[in-house]
Image: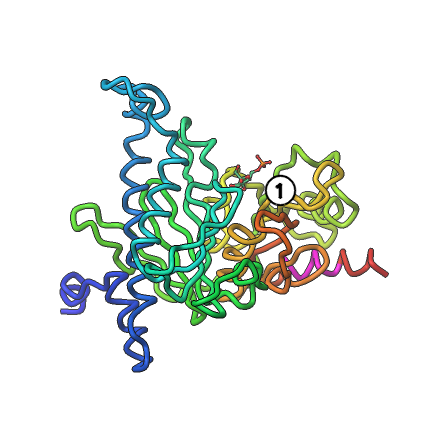
């Protein structure tokens, strides 16, 4: 009986968000409409990424196609799809994309109350070898829809209303928070719908995995070097942690969220602010981690407390299981003394 109910009671992402919306009678459904357009973009990218290998075979992606047209690279194509989908939603005022140096200000007739910051295809250098990649996004409310300014997207991460990612891997998984926990949805290609498969995700309080690019070890600062050393040669007699590093943030964060552990992209002598971007990598992933019971730290402060001054600003980031991040916070605090 229960199994049958699950099979027929399809909780699609649209229905899930509509349920949320019904708790706010004053809501006009703008967020639901916005999210539907983000989901549409993700479905397009999922389909294109899955064909990317084939497309390369038949000379589509990144080369000239049968009409002799220069095909756009997948990240450029994905960016255009998201920009057009978000503008046509009529619910956005400002868009910030990893692919565009400047912010996109939506024309007045199509303006809405949200600002979206996103990386349309994070980790896209991994496409050709079939490693999972993803779309990452965060959503702010515009202060004055009649006068959108850059201040609306240079807000602290703690003002983000919603954030999420879509991972294009063995399955297409959409993970979302609207500030009331984290939920995961898996695309059912036969329906073309994202179905709720991971309700109320909570990250384990402590994990057995650390995730960092060890190739940067020569340039790490003291606390990071000590922490990684402790992962490999624990002093308390516990067993060493496992190293898992995919090199695609969405995949490394998704594994951390589900299995626990810590993901680190620290500052180093070459990149004093680390590599990952505050608005559309650090903030959305930090928001998700906190909502799942984990935490996110920059080496100096809570990641969501950062206030970016530039659209493509970078920050070091340590995120994941609460206890694991606590350990590296203590090492940085000791160094700061
Ligand atoms: P590195 C991919 O290029 C990316 O932006 C993130 O997805 C990933 O976490 C990171 O860079 C990997 O960087 O220096 O370890 O190759």
Q: Position of residue 233 (x, y in %)?
A: 71, 44
Query: Which image quadrant for residue 283?
Result: bottom right
Q: Position of residue 244 (x, y in %)?
A: 54, 41
Closer to us: 155 or 319: 155
Q: Is the stretch drawn in magenta largely helix, strand or loop?
A: helix
Identity of the residue drawn at 41% across and 31% down: 127
Ligand 1, image quadrant it occupies:
top right
User: Does 49 appear above or below 304?
Assistant: above
Q: Position of residue 168 (x, y in %)?
A: 36, 42
Instruction: Indicate if the residue with disc 1 has its beta carbon within 8 Å of ligand 1.
Output: yes
Q: Which residue is mark 1?
A: 275
Quadrant of the rendering where the C terminus is positioned = bottom right
Identity of the residue drawn at 64% across and 61% down: 306
Residue 101 makes an appearance in the image: yes
Identity of the residue drawn at 81% across and 59% down: 334
Magenta highlight range: 325-330
Name the residue furthest right.
337
């Amino acid at each position: 009986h229960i199994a049958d109910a699950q099979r027929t009671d399809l909780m699609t992402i649209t229905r899930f968000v509509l349920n949320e919306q019904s708790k706010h009678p004053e809501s006009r459904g703008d967020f639901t409409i916005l999210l539907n357009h983000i989901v549409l973009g993700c479905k397009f990218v999922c389909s294109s990424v899955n064909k990317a290998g084939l497309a390369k075979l038949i000379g589509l992606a990144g080369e000239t196609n049968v009409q002799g047209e220069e095909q756009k690279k997948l990240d450029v194509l994905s960016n255009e799809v998201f920009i057009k989908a978000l503008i046509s939603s009529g619910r956005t005022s400002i868009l910030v994309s990893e692919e565009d140096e400047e912010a996109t200000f939506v024309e007045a007739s199509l303006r809405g109350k949200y600002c979206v910051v996103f990386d349309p295809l994070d980790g896209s250098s991994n496409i050709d070898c079939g490693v999972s990649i993803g779309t990452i996004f965060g959503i702010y409310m515009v202060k004055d829809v009649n006068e959108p300014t850059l201040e609306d997207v240079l807000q602290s991460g703690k003002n983000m209303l919603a954030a999420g990612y879509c991972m294009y891997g063995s399955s297409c998984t959409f993970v979302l928070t609207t500030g009331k926990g984290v939920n995961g949805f898996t695309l059912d290609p036969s329906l073309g719908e994202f179905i709720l498969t991971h309700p109320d995700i909570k990250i384990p309080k402590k994990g057995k995995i650390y995730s960092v690019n060890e190739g940067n070890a020569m340039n790490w600062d003291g606390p990071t070097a000590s922490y990684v050393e402790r992962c490999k040669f624990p002093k308390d007699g516990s067993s060493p942690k496992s190293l898992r590093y995919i090199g695609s943030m969405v995949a490394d964060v998704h594994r951390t969220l589900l299995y626990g552990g810590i993901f680190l992209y620290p500052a180093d002598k070459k990149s004093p602010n680390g590599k990952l971007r505050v608005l559309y990598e650090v903030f959305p992933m930090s928001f998700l981690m906190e909502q799942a019971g984990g935490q996110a730290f920059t080496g100096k402060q809570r990641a969501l407390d950062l206030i970016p001054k530039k659209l493509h600003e970078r920050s070091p980031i340590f995120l994941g299981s609460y206890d694991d991040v606590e350990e590296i916070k203590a090492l940085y605090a000791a160094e700061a003394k």
